[in-house]
Image (tube, grey):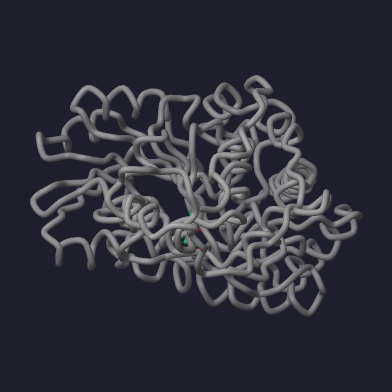
Amino acid sequence: MTSNPDSHPIPSAGSDPSSRIQDLLVFGEFGDVNPSITDSSTFTFLSPDTMGEVFTHEIEGCFLYSRHWNPTNKVLSQALSALEGSQSAQVTASGMAAISSTILQLCHAGDEVVSNRTIYGGTYAFFKNFLPRLGITVRFVDMLDPAEVVGAMTDRTRAVYCESMSNPLLEIVDIPKLAEIAHARGAKLVVDNTFSPLILSPLRLGADVVVHSMTKFINGTSDCVAGCICADDAFIHELTDIGSGACMLLGPVLDSFRSASIHKNLHSLHVRMQKHSENALYLARRIEDLGLKVYYPGLPSHPQYELLTRLANPGFGLGGMLAIDVGDLATANRLMERMQEAKIGYLAVSLGYFKTLFSSPSSSTSSEIPHEEQDRMGLKGGLVRMSVGLDHDIARTFERLRTCLEELRISAAV
Ligand code: PLP
């Protein structure tokens, strides 16, 4: 038998997520300052009896096979537990794997999910097009209106699903209120916290499960696709159960080399989030001063500004994402081409990278959502979503953006 998966307990560092991560010291095999990377799909047993006992659940806590658990993924999972303040966590090969495994673990045929309408297009497509094939129904509502959520709940509702900061409209949902509504009907509140790691701690606010696309801010270098699920011990145990766990049986395992590199990047997340937020706030204020319509939850003009400042953890700002409405898709496309030529950043989907990324959600990351539904959620064709990078001189970035807007005669008129 090899080492115990729980051999690196998380030190308690109070409620500050960044301090909890700071307190994690994991030694490598030779006292290395970075934990050793497990380069093995399988693990030895000294006795066949012990191996059999792992399969029959008579013993637990040893490494068996890397699709189940491996030490490198365990180390990253423990750091993610520290990030979200959860008892436990599981890493996955993508954000979509985290979302699909969670929902498929919670719901059986005949069950229902109540979801916010404003969510990432891929999640929307999974809910709308894929889950019905398995007999699972998703009801989409506007979660800014708690009465709509209450009205959609039934005895078959197993999960209430939302993004803490929604993609792409950057709406902020009232997590404590949604938790109350979900729990009153025995459902779990599942929150995708991809846009606001460290800034919001959904579990502390009452959620039951947090999922992330680690592809974004958590990793921060746009060099891999990965995800995670943070929850209590019982749920992570269910997900990894050899006989019935979605993570074990659907096989969305993260490679340990990627796990190790994400773990190193996670330790700079607090510095990056502060800078992303500082830069996004600067741009949002200046763009608003030009009279353009800006979506940024850190501006007092944002409808959920008060809510966000009440729910957010201090010290990380109010997010690195913003969106501008420039009127129509053709104008948005011309602007983005010009912004790339002006070296403001890349015309690319995704977010959380150290460089600025921009795209037009209605024709890209939200294109899975039918146009009538986009209209209902207020998603306009002229929206340009920006993931603001870690630019040292953000004033210069703004001047370049202003020049692009002026050249294209984009003004307050829209
Ligand atoms: N959740 C949100 C909010 C996203 O924006 C995305 C991808 O853009 C995902 C989940 C899916 O993550 P991944 O691409 O890592 O599967």
Is 41 placed above or below 112 here? Answer: below
User: On the rendered structure, is 206 left or right of 310?
Assistant: left
User: On the rendered structure, is 113 left or right of 67?
Assistant: left
Viewer-nearest residue: 74 or 116: 74
Q: Position of residue 289 (x, y in %)?
A: 74, 44
Occupied quadrant, residue 387: bottom right
Judge whether residue 294 can be spotted in this image: no
User: On the rendered structure, is 242 left or right of 367?
Assistant: left
User: On the rendered structure, is 64 left or right of 197?
Assistant: left
Q: Residue at horizontal 55%, vertical 40%?
A: 6
Is 184 placed above or below 410 here? Answer: above
Q: How many marks?
A: 0
Judge whether residue 336 can be spotted in this image: yes
Q: Position of residue 129 (x, y in %)?
A: 23, 67
Viewer-nearest residue: 69 or 317: 69
Q: Position of residue 287 (x, y in %)?
A: 72, 50
Is 131 placed above or below 158 here? Answer: below
Q: Position of residue 96 (x, y in %)?
A: 42, 62
Q: Residue at horizontal 37%, vertical 43%?
A: 59
Viewer-nearest residue: 23 or 344: 23
Q: Residue at horizontal 50%, vertical 25%?
A: 204
Q: Quadrant of the C terminus?
A: bottom right
Viewer-nearest residue: 141 or 218: 218
Is 37 placed above or below 137 here? Answer: below
